Image (cartoon, rainbow, N blue to C red):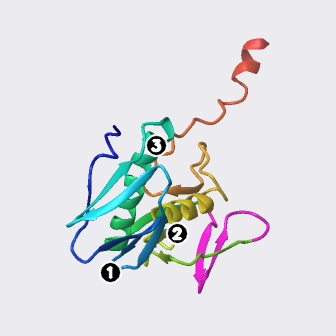
Amino acid sequence: MSRIGRKPVAIPSGVTVTVTGSAVTVKGSKGELTYTILPEVTVKVEGNQAIVERKGDSDAAKARHGLTRQLIENMVLGVSGGYKKTLEVIGVGYKVQIQGKKLTLNLGFSHPVEVSIPEGITMTQDEKNKNLLTIQGIDKQLVGQVAADIRTFRLPEPYKGKGIRYSDEFVRRKPGKAAAGKGAASAA
């Protein structure tokens, strides 16, 4: 039995979980999320817990048992508290601007990079540090994917540290080239 799958999902007050057919709907103060249950598992709500059980002992059923349980827990946490990722844009002349549902990034290219903000995502800039971008939403997968997509426009480089990185990410720095002429003097 899956160690993760056999744990019940605790449902906090203010959150409702309903199972109708092959769909699980989770409603909370921040919004509503729906998930289609995979055919290898069943979900039932007992009191303030959601319990995921698998129908068989196939490898696919075992894998999807823990997956379904974790996705339901992520939905419960999302509609009650939400998810947040913070990106830091580092580099001379690198700028971030939010205009309505559009994000404009100046990243040293000959043109600005424009990204439309998807539904369910809110982006904010820090008041003091304008190059600190916060991405928030109730869907954990969507928040992470939007942050990863923005980061790919200019990955952090190891020599000067320029680029877009997560605020808690550590970028290992490399030393530059050794002083020129050192090898030429010994050859003569």
Q: Quadrant of residue 102?
A: bottom right
Q: Amino acid at mark 1?
A: Ser
Q: Residue at x 72, y 19 (%)?
A: 183
User: Along the line of sight, which residue is nearer the eye, 150 or 105?
Assistant: 150
Q: Which quadrant does the N terminus fall into?
A: top left
Identify the residue under disc 3: 61
Q: Amino acid at mark 3?
A: Ala
Identify the residue under disc 2: 131
Q: Residue at x 51, y 77 (%)?
A: 120
The mark nearer the N terminus, 3 or 2, is 3
Q: Residue at x 45, y 68 (%)?
A: 21
Relative height, residue 47 to residue 1 (above, below) = below
Q: Which quadrant does the C terminus fall into?
A: top right
The mark nearer the N terminus, 1 or 3, is 1
Residue 177 covered by magenta stretch: no
Question: What secondary structure is found at the residue carrying circle 1?
Answer: loop
Span of residues in magenta = 92-111
**Number of residues whose C-alpha sits closer than 10 Å to that of mark 3, classed few (under 14), some (14–19) or many (20 or more):** many
Disc number at residue 49? none
Q: Amino acid at mark 2?
A: Asn
Residue 172 at x, y percent in the picture: 51, 40
Relative height, residue 141 to residue 130 (above, below) = above
The mark nearer the N terminus, 2 or 1, is 1
Residue 178 at x, y percent in the picture: 65, 29
Residue 119 at x, y percent in the picture: 56, 78
Q: Are marks 3 and 2 in contact (CB under 8 Å)?
A: no
Q: Nearer the viewer, mark 1 or mark 3?
A: 3
Identify the residue under disc 1: 29
